[in-house]
Image (tube, helix red, strand yellow):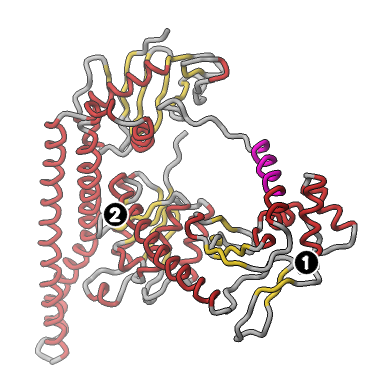
Amino acid sequence: MQHTKAVGIWIRVSTDDQARGESPEHHEKRARLYAESKGWQVFTVYHLEALSGKSVMGYAETKRMLADIRGGNITGLIFSKLARFARNTKELLEFADIFNQENADLISLEEAIDTSTPAGRLFYTMVAAMTQWEREEIVSRVVASIPIRAKLGKHIGGQPSLGYKWSGKRGEARELVIDEEFAPVRKLVYELFLKHKRKKTVAKTLNEQGYRTQAGKLFSDTTVTRLLRDSMAKGERRANHTDSMGGKKNYTLKPASEWVITRCPAIISEDLWNKCNNILDQIEKKRIKVGPPTKTLLAGYVVCETCAKKMYVYHQTNSSAYTCSKCKTRIPVEDLDDIFRDRLKDFLLTETSVSEYLEKIDVELQERKNLLFVVSEERKKLKEKADEMVNMRIGGEWNKETFVAHFRPIEERMMQIDNQLPELHADVDFLKMQHINGDTVLSDAKDLYNRWNDFTFEDKRHIVEDITKEIIVGREDIRIRLSHLPTNQARTAEPHPNTKSNQNPVKGQPVLQSGLNRN
């Protein structure tokens, strides 16, 4: 069963926007109409009216929005334009990173960015590139400074590992020296592990003998692993080798090329360190069960119509067919791959259908833009006229009755326009997204059939993941549900002679139906 996408609406309207007639209600209605056009459900609205956009991370509504994203209450956020979402570039990059990690979408109506579409996902790609560049710049500066500080004998940060301490006082040149109190314990960790080859046994033995960490805590197998892997004990101190993942114990290793290695006093021999780490490597190899990589192109997308369960290729049975484990419905892998490719050829398209679709969208978009301009200009003139009437009334040139008689029709027309403008904006927003998404997907897809055999398996798999919703295998036919193709295109594409369109296609998800041949 397909669930309706839940989204939030972000409202932050400046004083200048409101002076132009763009009230919070205007922006909310515009966003609601866009959500409605996409078949999405508005879960909540985040109100940040009259709040500065210089930095928005600390606002209560921002925290509520991020909690909803992380909690799965919403999977998308609609706002009028990027400047109304976050003016701070650093915060915008942070938001994009968070949304990408949570598999949620950002929808900016003014810039026509909708990351639920393939074209919009380019936004994430560009933001990720910018973020990576920024991180690399920071890393390069940090990496460059660490060796210099080390050579100068300065403290280069970090809590020293068990058996070591910093000499001198803060602010002075400090060196890493052996801590005579804990160095014997550090050496004992390696000797016990070499003897027992069990991390838990080492931790248990240390605790039973009354040894504790520098923080006064019991040893655990995790602590033992960390100490065994730390090369400081053999005289090599690694710096700039981890990235924090949040929290005191959450981190990941950086690429070895970014590490900075400096010499320090050794507690054990390099030979003892190597022997212990070789044992660790062998233990980890035995415990890590590497799952088989995806060998079939459509794995994860094939569904049995009868049982509504996914069908898999069970390699342990030497099968080369997608099989339903419950009803045993089968279809050969090669046959389904060929059907998928043929449907791309028949559905994705002819040159004519692409150009006709884009031309139609161009015409509709220009018409709505023209109408939006005309109506906006009319409101601007009405506002000027209304202001003039108010000044005449204040100046005593008009009495109350004359003022009301002339002002009321203008006021009523302005209210009509204020109700109409969000709808016109929403139409333009939707058509812009349709055009960008259509241009990107259709232009790239039209020659997929001819280039298909030139692609690597990984490239084909990425394409399948990008455009496929699911492939439903029935007793008599196969229905391929594609995603990210415009509804108009789905309705106008010429069907293959052996393909019949589903009578009730889901909006935005073209459904193709093909005869099924089984072995």
Q: Which of marks 2 and 1 is in front?
A: 1
Magenta stretch: helix, strand or loop mostly: helix
Q: Which residue lies most toward the bottom here?
A: 395
Observer able to see residue 516: yes
Q: Which residue lies most toward the right here?
A: 209
**Residue 207 left/right relative to 405:** right
Of 145 and 16, the residue lying toward us: 145
Badge 1 density bin: few <14, some 14–19, many ≥20, Cα 10 Å = some
Question: Callout 2, which amino acid?
Answer: Ile
- Identified at 32% across, 17% down, the residue is 514
Residue 38 percent coordinates (x, y): 32, 45
Question: Callout 1, which amino acid?
Answer: Ala
Q: In which quarter of the image is the C terminus?
A: top left
Q: In this view, does 490 lie above or below 326?
A: below
Identify the element where label 2 is drawn. Answer: strand
Residue 424 percent coordinates (x, y): 20, 56
Residue that badge 2 annotates: 113
Residue that badge 1 annotates: 183
Of 342 and 188, the residue lying toward us: 188
Residue 336 percent coordinates (x, y): 38, 19
Badge 2 density bin: few <14, some 14–19, many ≥20, Cα 10 Å = many
Of 83 and 425, the residue lying toward us: 83
Q: In this view, does 201 lie above or below 462?
A: below
Extent of the magenta region: 276-287
Identify the element where label 1 is drawn. Answer: helix
Q: In this view, does 13 lie above or below 128?
A: below
